[in-house]
Image (spheres, coloured by chain):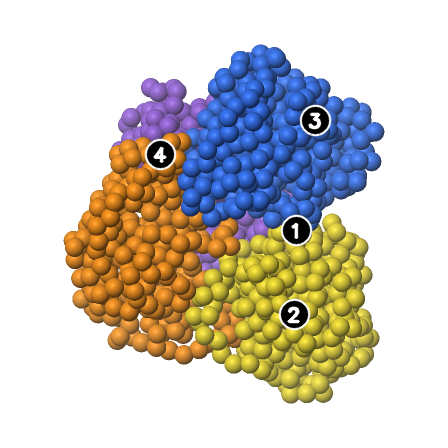
Chain colours: A purple, B blue, C orange, D yellow
Amino acid sequence: MKVYRVNEFGSWDALRVREEALPEVGPGQVLVRVRASALNFRDILIVRGLLPYGPVAGMIPHSDGAGEIEAVGTGVRRFKVGDRVVSTFFPNWLGGRIPKHREQYMVEHDGWLAEYRVVSAEALSPMPDHLSFEEGATLPCAAVTAWSALGGVGPGDTVVTLGTGGVSIFAIQLAKLLGARVIATTSTDDKFDKLRQLGADNLINYKETPNWGQAVRDLTGGTGAERVIEVGGPATIAQSVQAVANGGQVSLVGALGNQGGDIDIMKLFYSQAAYKAIGVGSRSDMEEMNRVISLHKLHPVIDSVFDFADARAAYEQLDGRKVFGKVVIRH
Amino acid sequence: MKVYRVNEFGSWDALRVREEALPEVGPGQVLVRVRASALNFRDILIVRGLLPYGPVAGMIPHSDGAGEIEAVGTGVRRFKVGDRVVSTFFPNWLGGRIPKHREQYMVEHDGWLAEYRVVSAEALSPMPDHLSFEEGATLPCAAVTAWSALGGVGPGDTVVTLGTGGVSIFAIQLAKLLGARVIATTSTDDKFDKLRQLGADNLINYKETPNWGQAVRDLTGGTGAERVIEVGGPATIAQSVQAVANGGQVSLVGALGNQGGDIDIMKLFYSQAAYKAIGVGSRSDMEEMNRVISLHKLHPVIDSVFDFADARAAYEQLDGRKVFGKVVIRH
Amino acid sequence: MKVYRVNEFGSWDALRVREEALPEVGPGQVLVRVRASALNFRDILIVRGLLPYGPVAGMIPHSDGAGEIEAVGTGVRRFKVGDRVVSTFFPNWLGGRIPKHREQYMVEHDGWLAEYRVVSAEALSPMPDHLSFEEGATLPCAAVTAWSALGGVGPGDTVVTLGTGGVSIFAIQLAKLLGARVIATTSTDDKFDKLRQLGADNLINYKETPNWGQAVRDLTGGTGAERVIEVGGPATIAQSVQAVANGGQVSLVGALGNQGGDIDIMKLFYSQAAYKAIGVGSRSDMEEMNRVISLHKLHPVIDSVFDFADARAAYEQLDGRKVFGKVVIRH
Amino acid sequence: MKVYRVNEFGSWDALRVREEALPEVGPGQVLVRVRASALNFRDILIVRGLLPYGPVAGMIPHSDGAGEIEAVGTGVRRFKVGDRVVSTFFPNWLGGRIPKHREQYMVEHDGWLAEYRVVSAEALSPMPDHLSFEEGATLPCAAVTAWSALGGVGPGDTVVTLGTGGVSIFAIQLAKLLGARVIATTSTDDKFDKLRQLGADNLINYKETPNWGQAVRDLTGGTGAERVIEVGGPATIAQSVQAVANGGQVSLVGALGNQGGDIDIMKLFYSQAAYKAIGVGSRSDMEEMNRVISLHKLHPVIDSVFDFADARAAYEQLDGRKVFGKVVIRH
């Protein structure tokens, strides 16, 4: 079978394909024929050697995979041969409280950029029936992050999203299923139509309206948004503080934009809101989300699909940041 | 009857007592013989003219009052003559979602530094039976703030408190009733015994251990505290970020310490915690707290009691900041 | 002004209109020009003398009213002249925990079957802007009951409703806004189209399928429904137990059907579900619901509208039970 | 190694010890040297052949075991050799929503009445450090059931417990850690002292006060108890309905008492409370509970300890029902 391993860090050249023997299935394990995997910015940071905690050289990358069960070990009741499955971002966070140490792909575990993988049956979830493998592969990181970032949102609330990356697009789609109103920001009017089709109720071009926080307040009669899905970090937090309602929440998802400085903690206090760091979620979080995705037959938005042999091109596509949805590799 | 009014802002001299006629009681209203009122830093900021939003000259100060019902208007079923009551911090936030505009004493309403007050019966709550008026008067602002800041804490959690002001002392007492472990910080070992008697399980002298955030981590086996009651603002937030557990919460209560600079939003993200601004609470929040205070016969900690005629001395006592608990005026 | 009062109990004749003087507005009170009121089964039970706790002879009936503010007393900030408002079911349950005694119309308070009413400003909520007075008048009892009965439902859940009374119709509409799947039962296929237009995903004729609990299980792949809005009481509880999922909830709303016997408590245990009595809700509950109704421009379903002079005909219409939505009186 | 297996159902004779070979440890699995196991009424029903769903002849009984890890398979990070562990009641309910099928010991899995067991590392939780193996073995069923039955209780609430079985005793201890007031009922005054030592605030002899529901109301100023831990089923439900507060909850835990008839569903409605079936809990629920047990160094109450060879005597002890706490077997 073919697998990619990241043998050193620093450039796309680190990504190299090799031939390996098919591993055996032990008790409690399953053999997965991987059919698709999806990329996240974390994968770019890993290959570049920029992840602040330690990925391990020589491992298989990609936290997000989807495939089919080809064999089950003794004692496995959770799946049977032929079941379609997706990976979970943290293989050991199955539910409940965050474990003291969350294990990760490329740190403790080989990932999904491979033709086959043998893993514990507990590290997988059933894939929603209506999805293709390419769609299913987008769920473990970006969709679960959006789901966790929306936790507690209900109909009557207003949600603000930033840009058209994977998390933001999922946030729009899931927020609509939660009954919320969505105000989506983007850098170009060209994307307005596609965002509207996904359910965005209001659109703001943040290049033309750099003070979009105030624009959100205006659109909400002065109240502000109950939830901001903050993916920009230092570059956007000041506007998010401006946009959020008293009693609302800014979900801190990441730092796609590095420009921008520090923030006065008293501004957070006077906003009378909460600022909550989101760290993807547990297997149970993903399964709650998948119930919703299944019932409403939600289809993830895929920016582009690359062949297994062209993994490097997929990295370059995501790294260019001009994406609308997820970048996927077909295995 | 005698009342204090704040006729201008800038110095303690602004606080002047005067004689006024007793107001009449209309439908839905009650006449309260005020027996005690308590001071908060907000009152100091008001008299000094430093409150960032607008107090109105000529009004009666003090958000926190306790007294006895002397007369009830038509249609009042909530209280009867002789009932002992306490004020609520926001007279129009009775429960549920934060109202678009929260009315406040010294802004829209005359406060409690008076011998008598006529108010809507809805602006009051029953005082727990086991408390004196001096004790009851401490509840509306500091105790409710501590209660809200502890929202969601349970037995099994660790709570960190800073110093010995009113909110921090209530936070220690209430955290123990919630079953939590308390790590209390203070500036001097002299207060260790009193803090232990209130229930603190561990004590840190933050002058001797300026990196007390790490000390909290060490005391919790590396996990950190599930809740930090952050009253220091810019001066202490960096240590609070260090102290809080993944998945925990720093409750932003105020800014007693003004030294210290801005904070990198990515530090908040990497802490994987939530930073939630606390704005006292509703009447319903206070009544939930009072159930607990009543069942457990909790007694608020009073730093000092001043006579009605000596209100200015009470302000000076709180302003000196060398308090252990609440400063109260007996009417 | 004209008002109806219920002078004795037992027959529709008890409902008599009379001319009374306009009451005066005191501090904290408002004068409402009532424009519409809505009927609930509780009103029928009251006039018939069948309500199990004590309505008081001589009072004005109807818990549900909508109108316009014509005058405000001193100190009223919550409303101004011209505001459109609706009543709240329990005038003294403003939010938070259920008060020890919930005051009610026809027990402690005159109700809304009148041209004018003077009440405390706290007993009213703003009416959603997009509604007519007839629509607004339907909210206080039936809609809030449906809202409370749906508490905790989210997208991914399945909700079962019984019949086409006011609560059930609101439950269908609100469940869709919460993102849920709705299985609606009714006694006749004629209503299928209208129920589908309201959002019902599946329909069951409970006359043709008396074992509809099993039909719900079949429609949910054996899982059962996460929520059953149980309005039938003894007549339908056995099927509701059959329909509900492990970990789900049957919301006990009332007892429209009196036939049927007792239930074995062990059946409730083995269903591994919760059975929760719903008692309308607080003002805060109504205001949360109204945010949702306003954002989604939900229009209540009105069965029929009667003139103020024809109140008796309205009672007869509801009593006939062949309704689809709410029976309303235009004042 | 020695194991007990239940070869047929109907009498204690079915419990027979035999010698078996030590099983091998596969990937993801651990070898546990079982040091103690605890009995539940479920075990009695199983051996007697009275469990309503199907236990399988030939399996090892006991859901509750504690022991030491003697060997770990490849890939196990959750435990290392020497770790002390307890079993979880449902080996496949690790957290989150109840799985469609909860696997059980004696149904899908061999249980813990054995000297050694090889199981998935996911089926175990760390044992609190301060406990003996005999104490640890009591946690998986009775303690988790009490914990789940108390879910949502806080300081300020009143909890009612019935009798001195394992669940009720744990409910008293855990309710005190949650800050609640406890009213304990029992059949004899002899047990009053021991119950008081465990933290019970009030005691009722239910033989002398058969209408103990009213006694609970009297003790709570007419309000009733916010939570009743209902272990008696048909025999006691009528009194529990009487005891529970508006807005409170009766947790339906089981049916130790079979006498008593059906209940009118309208009585449940008029109580304005919730009746929630409790089905033990997930691994995550147990781990939340164990945090609390560890922090507060709670020690389970053990009625009696039997040697591994005397398992039958342990069954007879529990079957006699004159227990105060848990019956345990030392392996």
Badge 2 marks a residue whose secondary structure is: strand
Quadrant location of the C terminus of chain B?
top right
What is the spatial separation of the Cα atoms under label 4 and label 3, in whole angstroms?
38 Å
Residue depicted at x 44% and y 25% = A242
**Residue of label 1:** B295
C-alpha gap between disc 3 and disc 2: 50 Å
Kind of residue at disc 1: Leu
Residue at image coords 79%, 40%: B197
Query: Tag on residue B306?
Result: 3
Q: Chain of mark 4?
A: C
Disc 4 vs disc 2: which is toward the camera? Answer: 4
User: Horizontal placement of B44 versus B95: left or right?
Assistant: right
Image position of B89 with respect to A296: above or below: above
Q: Which marked residue is nearer to the observer: mark 1 or mark 3?
A: 3
Q: Secondary structure at mark 3?
A: strand
Q: Are marks 4 and 3 in contact (CB under 8 Å)?
A: no
Per the model, the C-alpha gap separating discs 2 and 1 is: 22 Å
